[in-house]
Image (cartoon, rainbow, N blue to C red):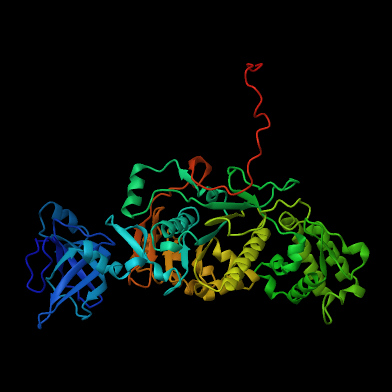
């Protein structure tokens, strides 16, 4: 294609180099147009371009957009085999490249199409910021990665913090889409970029670790971070550092009478967590034992609440370790109870006895419903006995709380699925109630939860799903922001996804990419998402009509034991025991 010549329809800014002209063979509209790329230039997907049109009254309209498609072909060829004749010079033809541009912004808002032959250039500096609405974000610019042009890309934080919207949905194939890495990068950016201003120190994050121990080293520097990656953090205006205030909670190690946290590679700022039988009864936690989505469709669900109310009303705390005694039952059954299995045994005995059953459940309850309830309750003994107990000496800080650190990580990967659901449900309810009682949205509370399709499936109902729906629908007004990740957004409750202002997609399964839940991605981006490499994400936000492809830096914090560098955290736990050999003279040489 020939070099572009100066256009009478609109002039570029001084110093801008045209990359092509608006073509006339494809109709241009106020919302999209095509660019013929000059022979010595190129345009790639995601490039930001700008052109101008001068109106009869002298007004100059600036039309900016993002390249969403590029095609190359031979003009003058009719058959596929003509390419060989053209190569040999036997058939005259011209190579043409045409880029499709989706308009993102028109200033002033006079929606007219660009004229054919008008010069088009890459948008840089202020024009790029204007094309992508970064100039309207002011102090709410949250860095999320680098664009294809190597320049920073921002989210409007007002669509994250609840001001104009809230919640983030991240989708992608497990192990390839780097969903949790992006979620933690978002937290790092929010805490260090300045968008939280003076509230950063008091803002909290609750992170559930469901896959291995990868999220247990957020406060360790990444020993594999290269200078090139550090430079990428510098371009984003972020420190290439790990988190500084992290508290990890892990379930007690099975069979350990001292309640040591069940972690392998972390030995700092880690505490065990479990609920005592007294807390289980007082807080009416029974519904979360039946947290599977299928339970709410069963006939015995009305028994759950009735049994929970009876336990709350008639339990009494015994001693300081959380054991309980249940009033108004056979003295041989009532306690003291020190294990979840003993509590389940009591309920089983009471409900199977026709004389005592009426004291626990109201009305004419069928034997079939009672048996179904007890069968499900009995199946929960083994998975939940580690985290519901009263046989450990009180260690002090063993309750899940976000008050000890800026980032609280709850390790679930060693727990069975049933126990994971229990912990997630109870923890979310606790934090949501705390924010309700606090009465103010600030400081914010971010909740990072992977496998959202497991906890809030599209079909069925459960206590966890109801809490997540509450967070999605009312959370932004309370300052509770959900950062949910899932392999398949199509399997997550629609109302939760619909309430997420920010939607992010990494590598997608081809079948999943065709689902309507990804309608925010243009066809070219849907296809690209099926081959996206780790670290590449497509970010959609209400401010910008087109999702932006970004690459976020390699984590500056360790994501596995092999990456552990210097520890940068704070340990507010019990002091290490004193060295029993301190003070012994070391004059004599060792006998070996």
Could you tell me which residue is drawn at 13 percent across and 73 percent down?
A: 116
Could you tell me which residue is drawn at 48 percent across and 74 percent down?
A: 499
x then y, percent, for residue 521: 38, 68
Asked whether, in this view, residue 435 is left or right of residue 415, the answer is left
Q: Is residue 414 visible?
A: no
Q: Which corner quadrant of the image does residue 182 belong to?
A: bottom left
Total labels drawn: 0
Q: Nearer the viewer, residue 553 or 458?
A: 553
Say which quadrant the C terminus sits in: top right
x then y, percent, for residue 214: 53, 49
Asked whether, in this view, residue 149 is left or right of residue 351, the answer is left
x then y, percent, for residue 413: 61, 52
Residue 236 vs 257, above or below: the answer is below
Q: Which corner quadrant of the image does residue 64 belong to?
A: bottom left
x then y, percent, for residue 201: 48, 59
Q: Nearer the viewer, residue 154 or 77?
A: 154
Asked whether, in this view, residue 46 is left or right of residue 295, the answer is left
Say which quadrant the N terminus sits in: bottom left
Residue 588 vs 538, above or below: the answer is above
Q: Nearer the viewer, residue 305 or 274?
A: 274
Q: Is residue 534 visible?
A: yes
Could you tell me which residue is drawn at 14 percent across and 61 percent down?
A: 16
């Amino acid at each position: 294609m020939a070099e572009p010549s100066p256009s009478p329809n609109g002039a570029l800014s001084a110093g801008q180099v045209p990359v092509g002209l608006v073509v006339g063979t494809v109709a241009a509209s106020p919302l999209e147009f095509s660019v013929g790329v000059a022979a010595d230039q190129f345009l790639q997907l995601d490039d930001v371009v700008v052109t101008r049109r001068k109106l009869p009254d002298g007004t100059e309209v600036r039309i900016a957009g993002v390249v969403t498609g590029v095609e190359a072909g031979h003009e003058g060829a009719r058959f596929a085999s003509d390419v060989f004749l053209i190569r040999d010079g036997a058939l005259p033809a011209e190579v043409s490249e045409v880029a499709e541009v989706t308009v993102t912004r028109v200033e002033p808002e006079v929606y007219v199409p660009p004229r054919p032959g008008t010069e088009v250039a890459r948008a840089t500096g202020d024009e790029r910021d204007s094309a992508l609405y970064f100039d309207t974000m002011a102090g709410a610019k949250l860095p999320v990665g680098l664009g294809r042009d190597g320049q920073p890309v921002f989210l409007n934080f007002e669509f994250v913090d609840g001001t104009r919207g809230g919640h983030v949905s991240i989708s992608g194939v497990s192990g390839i889409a780097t969903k949790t890495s992006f979620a933690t990068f978002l937290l790092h950016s929010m805490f260090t970029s300045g968008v939280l201003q003076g509230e950063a120190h008091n803002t909290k994050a609750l992170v559930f670790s469901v896959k291995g121990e990868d999220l247990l080293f957020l406060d360790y520097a990444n020993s594999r971070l290269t200078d090139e990656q550090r430079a990428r953090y510098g371009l984003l205006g972020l420190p290439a550092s790990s988190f500084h205030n992290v508290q990890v909670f892990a379930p007690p190690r099975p069979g350990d009478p001292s309640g040591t946290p069940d972690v392998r590679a972390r030995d700092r700022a880690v505490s065990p967590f479990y609920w005592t039988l007294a807390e289980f009864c007082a807080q009416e936690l029974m519904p979360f034992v039946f947290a599977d989505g299928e339970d709410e469709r069963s006939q015995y669900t009305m028994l759950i609440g009735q049994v929970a109310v009876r336990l709350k009303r008639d339990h009494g705390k015994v001693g300081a370790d959380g054991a309980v005694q249940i009033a108004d039952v056979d003295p041989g059954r009532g306690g003291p109870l020190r294990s979840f299995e003993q509590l389940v045994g009591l309920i089983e005995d009471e409900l199977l006895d026709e004389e005592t059953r009426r004291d626990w459940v109201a009305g004419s309850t069928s034997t079939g419903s009672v048996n179904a309830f007890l069968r499900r309750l009995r199946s929960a003994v083994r998975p939940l006995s580690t985290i519901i107990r009263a046989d450990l000496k009180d260690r002090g800080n063993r309750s899940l709380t976000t008050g000890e650190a800026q980032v609280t990580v709850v390790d679930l990967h060693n727990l069975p699925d049933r126990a994971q659901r229990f912990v997630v449900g109870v923890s979310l309810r606790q934090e949501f109630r705390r924010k309700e009682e606090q009465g103010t949205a600030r400081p914010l509370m971010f909740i990072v939860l992977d496998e959202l399709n497991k906890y809030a499936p599209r079909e069925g109902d459960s206590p966890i799903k109801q809490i997540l729906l509450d967070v999605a629908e009312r959370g932004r007004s309370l300052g509770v922001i959900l950062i949910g990740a899932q392999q398949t957004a199509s399997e997550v409750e629609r109302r939760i996804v619909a309430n997420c202002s920010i939607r992010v997609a990494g590598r997608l399964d081809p079948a999943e990419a065709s689902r309507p839940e990804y309608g925010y991605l243009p066809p070219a981006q849907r296809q690209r998402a099926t081959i996206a490499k780790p670290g590449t994400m497509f970010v959609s936000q209400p401010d910008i009509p087109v999702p932006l492809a970004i690459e976020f830096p390699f984590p500056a914090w360790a994501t596995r034991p092999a990456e552990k560098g210097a520890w940068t955290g704070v340990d507010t736990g019990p002091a290490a025991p004193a060295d029993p050999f301190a003070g012994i003279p070391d004059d004599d040489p060792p006998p070996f």
